[in-house]
Amino acid sequence: SDWKDRRLWVTVLPIMGITFPAAVQAVLWWRYRIAFGATLCVLGLLFGEWVNRYFNFWGWTYFPY
């Protein structure tokens, strides 16, 4: 089973959608005592989407090959 398998995203997306913002929140809280880690993750994703659409950047299409 390849990690790119479409059925795998049913389990990967919710797990990463919770753990990645939680990890960012933990680091931001530990260092700076600010509580907007998930907001920072969403803004980063929106910025990445904007860069992708604005520059028509096709390099991420098949990442990581």
Image (cartoon, rainbow, N blue to C red):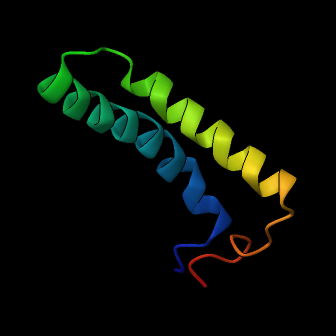
Q: Is residue 62 left or right of residue 40?
A: right
Q: Is residue 59 left or right of residue 4?
A: right
The percent position of residue 63, horizontal first and vertical second, equals 62, 75
Total tally of numbered discs in the picture: 0
> Relative to 57, is 34 above or below?
above
> Relative to 29, is 4 above or below?
below
> Relative to 50, is 1 above or below?
below
- Looking at the rendered image, the quarter that the C terminus falls into is bottom right
Name, please, the residue furthest toward the left.
30
The percent position of residue 41, horizontal first and vertical second, equals 48, 34
Q: Is residue 65 or residue 60 the one in the foreground?
A: 60
At 84% from the left and 52% from the top, the residue drawn is: 53
Name, please, the residue furthest toward the bottom.
65
At 52% from the left and 73% from the top, the residue drawn is: 3
The percent position of residue 19, horizontal first and vertical second, equals 34, 39
At 85% from the left and 52% from the top, the residue drawn is: 54
The percent position of residue 28, horizontal first and vertical second, equals 25, 28
Q: Is residue 46 or residue 12 the one in the foreground?
A: 46
Which quadrant would residue 7 be assigned to in this image?
bottom right
Q: Is residue 7 left or right of residue 13?
A: right
